[in-house]
Amino acid sequence: MQNQGAESPMTSHGRRAARGAASMFVAQLTLTLSSYVVALALARALGPELYGAYGIVYSFLLSVELIGRLGLPQAVTKLIADERTVAPQLEATGVTLAAIVYATIFAGFWLAGPALGALFHVADGARLFRIAAIDIPFYGVYFMLINILTGRRLFHAAGLGTIVYGLTKAAGILILVQIGPSIAGALVVNAIGSVVALAVVLPFVGRAPLRLTLARRRPIIRLAVPVALISLGTQTVISVDLWVLNAVGTAVDDAVKGLYVAAVNVARIPNFLAFVMSAVLVPTVAAALAAGDQEAARSYLGGAVRFMAIALLPGCTLIAINAAEVLTLLFSSDYAAGADLLAVLIFAHGLCYTMFLSLANVLVGAGRATTSARLSLGTLAVATALSVTLVLWAGAPGAAWAALIANAAGLVGATVVIGKAVGVPVDGSILARVLLLTAVVGGASWWIEGRGVMLLVEFALLGMVYLALLPVAGLLARADVEAFLPEWARRAG
């Protein structure tokens, strides 16, 4: 007979998932803020043209590193969660595969440096791309270890590693700006961040996963293949508009490309939510489905999608309405001309892509990796075709609209597929209420017209009003808050 005060397994797992989400939220928020410290410091120190060159080198490096995972870390995370026991041999095989793959990518990236510099029209591109390559092997192993920790559901340890990674890079860039900013120096700092973060997470992982072996390679590779295709699609679609703009937009001024890089950096702020949700939901949904608990998986997913809608819709709307003021505040008045680009890109990369990426990754946990791969590659094909067509026709604005149309299409497709695999993640009445509250705060922001520091005050006040309206609209309940509270606080009411 169950004790009256005992938690059900579903409640216990749900609470653990919620607290894990909170830990990863703090970690990813710190990483995002650190990334924007880097972006703002470099944008101001380098100016639009040099910052545009840095943006294309770094964005290509980041995409190669993300795609170069080949699905291995994500596969290891799911397999660890499925086993529900300590799996040192599986983890060690994952680390070995990551070391081999990223060493190979490093060599290829180094050799391709001159060709990449010529393709993207980057001055001194061969040297810069080769400096960027230094980060590849360190980042690859670091990220595999982070995924091992999330597979074990040690979210606090994974979060600490992420925080150290972000803060190290931000501190390094701030020092660099003081002693003499340069693109090469910024790329070196990026590699140092990976080295320091790798050293921090090693003690949490332990020695067992570092004993190189390929004994469990078959299940990892079998799952990693479709996950790699998902990464190829999702991690390329986030940058294909920028790449096409630089590759075929020869008539576009370099300063305009710098404005586009700045707008993209702001538009990607919400992406950290996708990394939070993916890190928590993939192992949680996988564990629930492995235990035969479809209702629990649907509940976790529904809560996550509701949270993303509540956070993303008003946030992206406020940034779009105040695009010129946001760019001026973050970068300088030299970047205000990119307001029209940001107004489109914040919905393309901030709203649609964030939710699309989250759902595409959750499909892996739901056992639909192949379907997710097809969807991701299809979205990439649409994005590429649209980007080439619209950049040639309309330049930088064409690239922004191509990104919006493609990511919106990907989100619609992912929503349909996830509904069939797990269940409808959120009902229409919730979405309607979120849209209504978004219209309220958006209209108020349009009327207030805050600038400079007052823009932050405006956002803070509107944020408090929005939060106060959430319970009134039935979008936030006591149960939503209780999941994040410690036991003594729940007992105290």
Image (spheres, rainbow, N blue to C red):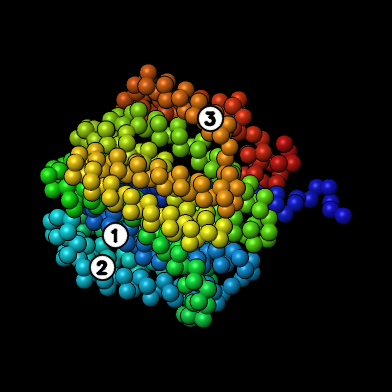
* Marks 2 and 1 in Cβ contact (< 8 Å): yes
- Which residue was labeled with disc 1? 61
Residue at position x 27%, y 36% in the image: 341
The span from disc 2 to disc 1 (Cα, nearest Å) is: 9 Å
Q: Is residue 265 above or below residue 184?
A: above
Compare residues 39 and 254 and report the one nearer the observer: 254
Compare residues 333 and 438 and report the one nearer the observer: 438
Of the two numbered discs 3 and 2 on the same chain, state the one appearing first in sequence: 2
Is residue 96 in sight in this rendering?
yes
Residue at position x 38%, y 54% in the image: 378
What kind of residue is marked 1? Leu
- The x, y position of residue 447, in whole percent, is 37, 18
Quarter of the image for residue 395 reads top left
What kind of residue is marked 2? Phe
Q: Residues within 10 Å of mark 1 (few under 14, many from 20)?
A: some
What kind of residue is marked 3? Ala
- Which residue was labeled with disc 3? 432
* Marks 3 and 2 in Cβ contact (< 8 Å): no
Residue at position x 14%, y 60% in the image: 118
Q: Is residue 457 above or below residue 363?
A: above
Q: Which mark is residue 109?
A: 2
